[in-house]
Image: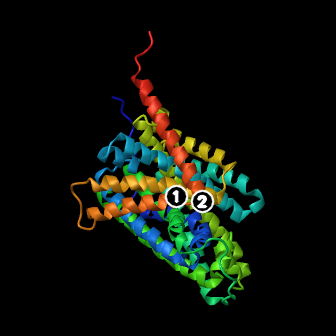
Amino acid sequence: MQTHQRLQRRLGVFDATAIGLGSMLGAGVFVVFSPATALAGPLMIVSVLVAGAIAYCNAVASAQLAAKYPASGGTYVYGRKQLGEWPGFIAGWGFVTGKTASCAAMALTSGHYVAPGFATPLAVAAVVVLTGVNLMGITRTALLTRILLAIVLGTLVFVTVAGIAGPHPEPAGPVTGPGSAWGILPAAGLMFFAFAGYARIATLGEEVKDPARTIPRAILAALAAAFTIYLALAVLLLWHLSPGRLAESLSPLLDAVTSSGLAAGAPVVQAGAAAACLGALLALITGVGRTALAMARERDLPSALARVGGQHTVPFVAELSVGAAVIVLLLTADVLTVVGFSSFGVLIYYSVTNAAAFTLAERPRTAPRWLNAAGFVGCLILAVTLPLASVAGMAAVLAAGVAGRFLVLRLRKLPPRT
């Protein structure tokens, strides 16, 4: 049986929480409020609550499983252990493909905020630099994540103060498009894109100290902080910009500051948006690389991706492959479209998480089975109510992955040619 070099446990509760929160406070917080409002109108706040509730179910399930299986790979590993190889593969494939598209969205968003005319070259440069940071080891990743997170939190505080202290503009008219109560669920599906970052904590299970204690605490702490921030921003943006203006805005937080009479603060928001996207991109590349590593160890992806080495003991082949895939996507990716792709893939991922957690015999009082069942049903409902293009596109990607694995398994069973 082939053995693989193990990663080293270097992350504590604070670092793991920072990586999870840094992943959540990425492009989502600067982009997703507008398309969600276009779907749900002023009821976008309800969508935030729905997405947060389902994210809590998923976080509890992730914490249960990560404590039992402290290895890299997250739900790919949990699904294989608790449900079988095929559910594990579907979870892993959904995560790798959905989050690779999300990496492209993060990189492009940072480029658009910094210099819209050079968004793609800047995005490619960001991917190259951050992949290099990841190759320097997980402790460097955690350090840079903490720095970027501090910048982002400072920016969000500035936006909040500007929105409250500045003059309240006149309402900009009703929401254009289908914004209504019927849009609450698809808007919640898009909002889920902004909540999904805590998955990165579970995918780092092999690099966390005392994982049975650290991972559950870090996941729940990161989710609680993100939910509080998102809900406050949703209320602020709807009050300050009005639903109609918010639905049409391509940079709502920037518009909130400029409309308050603080146009001089625009560079602060631009820098914060770039930092948020880069922090999330850094953690995403790390998480996708670790999941690819776990899948390669089980031969669900090419075995070369399982190689761990270098001075800093990192899965360097997987990291480089993820970076290369993201750069290819940057040439064709549309930010808002891939948000839907990412949401669909990750909702499928978390449906497997909840199903796997449901089968656990030992569970704390805070994680009853009905919570896992509610998370499973909620994930599937949000997934199928996303915009049709997102559902069709990612369903095709998942089907291609399933067909490819089925073919490979059949070929492996064929007798060797003589």
Quadrant of the drawing holding the C terminus:
top left
Above or below residue 398? Residue 253 is below
Could you tell me residue 378's position as x and y percent? 41, 63
Q: Which residue is mark 2?
A: 278
Residue 249 shown left or right of residue 196 in the figure: right
Q: Earlier in the sequence, mark 1 or mark 2?
A: 2
Point out the frontmost of discs 1 and 2: 1
* 166, above or below 378, in the image: below
**Mark 1, residue position:** 343
Q: Quadrant of residue 37?
A: bottom right
Q: Is residue 309 visible?
A: no
Quarter in which the N terminus is drawn: top left
Q: Depth check: 149 or 345 in front?
A: 345
Report if residue 26 is visible in the image.
yes
Relative to the observer, which residue lies in front, 129 or 69?
Answer: 69
Residue drawn where x is 38% and y is 45% of the image: 87
Q: Residues within 10 Å of mark 1 (few under 14, many from 20)?
A: many
